[in-house]
Amino acid sequence: MLIEFKNVSVERDGLSVLRRVHLSLTQRRIGVLGPNGSGKSTFIRLLNGLLLPQEGQVLVQGLDTRKEVSRIRSKIGFVFQNPDNQIVFPVVSEDIDFGLKRREANPEVRADLARQALEQVGVPHLAERLVHTLSGGERQLVALAAVLAMQPEILVFDEPTTQLDLRLRNRFEKLLQGLPQPAIVVSHDLELLRGMERVLVLRDGLVVLDAQPNEAIAWYLEHCA
Ligand SMILES: Nc1ncnc2c1ncn2[C@@H]1O[C@H](COP(=O)(O)OP(=O)(O)OP(=O)(O)O)[C@@H](O)[C@H]1O
Ligand SMILES: [Mg+2]
């Protein structure tokens, strides 16, 4: 994976929410940590052009998010902080199928991909459930399955474990370890971040530390707790 941020700044409503971020992301597992409102979701939304910077440039494998949004979006699987922003169809299998239509014309192949993805996240029994009857954690897993089914080249997670109980959170951690794709994970789950190769710490829109997990977490506990 090669993602480059070149002097990127973002303003919302005249306020600076991300300031002069300049770095390259090349590791397989990258964590993003920081207090509420520090700019973490803003940072990762820049990756697939959900948000464009006022200043600077974001390049995903050399593609500029300003110019190549659709190519970039087909490479990046983005799991949102709130699964309700992601699930649009009333039935789980329909929702997963809808996303897959962009990449697979054969409905039987799509059904197989959807089944495999639901199995991968441990909820094959939810395939025909109405989305509004799912618990919060189940919804988070279905949103995850919908993204994995697309087999994207790069995965981006915004607080993937917030609604999961301990057992499912542990299962997510194992699943993440085994996924072949590079992943960028925003999380307040410090144990999850310990398994990363690199952790960026954001505060007030600045990357204040870019380090190994232990160092980053120790800094966060000392300065932001
Ligand atoms: N559309 C917007 N208009 C105004 N301010 C915004 C907008 N979007 C984000 N912000 C502000 O930008 C700052 C960073 O928001 P962001 O969602 O990136 O934070 P975060 O680190 O993901 O926080 P959390 O841990 O709570 O999810 C916040 O102060 C937020 O209120
Ligand atoms: Mg956020």
Image (cartoon, helix red, strand yellow):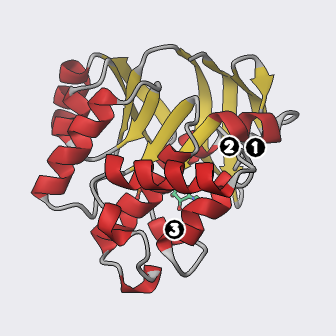
- Residue farthest to the front, as pictured: 108
Asked if the residues shown at circle 2 and circle 1 are in contact, with their CB atoms under 8 angstroms apart, the answer is: no
Q: What element carries label 1?
A: loop
Closest to the observer, 37 or 5: 5
- Amino acid of disc 3: Ser
One can see residue 50 in this view: yes
The residue that appears at 81% across and 41% down in the rendered structure is 70
Residue 86 position by quadrant: bottom right
Q: Which of marks 2 and 3 is nearer the N terminus?
A: 2
63 lies above or below 86:
above
Asked if the residues shown at circle 1 and circle 3 are in contact, with their CB atoms under 8 angstroms apart, the answer is: no
Dot label at residue 52? 1
* Distance between the alpha carbons at the discs numbered 1 and 3: 32 Å
191 lies above or below 97:
above
* Distance between the alpha carbons at the discs numbered 2 and 1: 8 Å
- Residue farthest to the right, as pictured: 67
Q: Specify whether tag 1 is near ligand 1 (CB below 8 Å).
A: no
* Residue 38, x across and y down, in percent: 44, 47
* Residue 192, x across and y down, in percent: 22, 37
Mark whose residue sits in front, 2 or 3 = 3
- Amino acid of disc 2: Val
131 lies above or below 28:
below
The residue that appears at 42% across and 19% down in the rendered structure is 28
Pointer 3: residues within 10 angstroms few (<14), some, or many (20+)?
A: many
